[in-house]
Image (cartoon, helix red, strand yellow):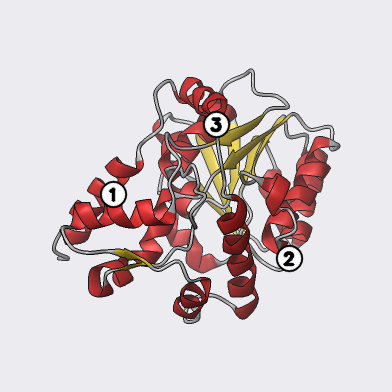
Amino acid sequence: MTILVLGGTGRVGTHLVRNLTSQNETVRVLVHNPDRAALVPDAAEVFVANILEDPNGARAAFGGVESVFMLNAATDHETVEGLLVLSMARAAGVKRFVYQSTHSLAHLHHIPHLGAKLAIEAALKSSGLDYTIISPNFFFQADEDCRYAMLQHGFYLNPVGDVGCWRVDVRDIAEAAAKVLTSDGHSGRNYALIGPENLTGPQCAEKWSRALGQPVRYEGDINVWEASMEPYLTSWMIEDVGAMFYEIGLHGMLGNVDELDTLTRLLGRPPRSYDDYIKESVVAWREPVS
């Protein structure tokens, strides 16, 4: 069967495509920009088309596809793009549709880029497609954005607050998505994907400090985070994600033991720990660049 992956060159999608191709699955990756095509592994097919600018061209990507994985980038047209993909999948007779949403939408749905996911979820549930939703918590790998600040200035910038998030490794998200795409028994499910523990901002900073062997202080100020992102994100996205961090500071992104047990069964093992992610990252960051 051919699996179409949308969002196949990002933090989750890259691992998903590699996972699927390692199982000898036939994978097609739809990218909007030709520059992203080079990021797709040779074992996967690349299809270049912009869904919004060339919907007819994008529609051809669904030819012969049995399963679709969709992870939309956070853009100001995320909802429109997601709904167009659902329409194309239905018209093409896709048999299985897996959508990556997000954890804790009940209290985050008013955040623009997360509210888009709620609208897409609702459309998917009424589409008639055989669907599964995966809803991951805050990624471990978001700490890559803090790397320079931690190493050079001793600050942990992600303002995840004092309530905490049951953060998760993107490799576990990708593995869970691959399981759902390639096995039966997941129809109509919404899998909350979480890590093995709740983590507050100060706890994250403390763990990094121990692993790096140098002081790392939790900053916690959303304004400081926003200023640090100005060279990399659009103004609206900084405002949007800043509002998300404000809500996370109030309510967290809290998982529970039942969610942890469900992911453990899905993976066939416990999810990766934050401590292990940090240890791996510290080793990688200290390797000389050739």
Label 1 vs label 2: CA separation?
Answer: 34 Å
Q: Residues within 10 Å of mark 3 (few under 14, many from 20)?
A: some
For the residues bearing labels 3 and 1, Cβ distance under 8 angstroms: no
How far across and down, in percent of the image, does residue 165 sit? 50, 46
Question: Is residue 60 in sight in this rendering?
Answer: no
- Determine which of the numbered discs, if any, sits on residue 77 in the image: 2
Vertically, is 64 above or below 32?
above
For the residues bearing labels 1 and 2, Cβ distance under 8 angstroms: no
Quadrant housing the N terminus: top right
> Residue 62 lies in what quarter of the image?
top right
Q: Secondary structure at mark 2?
A: loop
Of residue 103 and residue 187, the one placed in the foreground of this image is 103
The three-letter amino acid code for the residue at tag 3 is: Asn
Question: Is residue 235 in sight in this rendering?
Answer: yes
How far across and down, in percent of the image, does residue 100 sit? 62, 44
Residue corresponding to mark 3: 256
Point 48% across, 54% down: residue: 162
Q: Residues within 10 Å of mark 1 (few under 14, many from 20)?
A: many
**1 or 2: tag closer to the N-terminus:** 2
Q: Secondary structure at mark 1?
A: helix
The three-letter amino acid code for the residue at tag 1 is: Ile
Vertically, is 66 above or below 269?
below
How far across and down, in percent of the image, does residue 78 sit? 71, 60
The three-letter amino acid code for the residue at tag 2 is: His
Point 76% across, 43% down: residue: 121
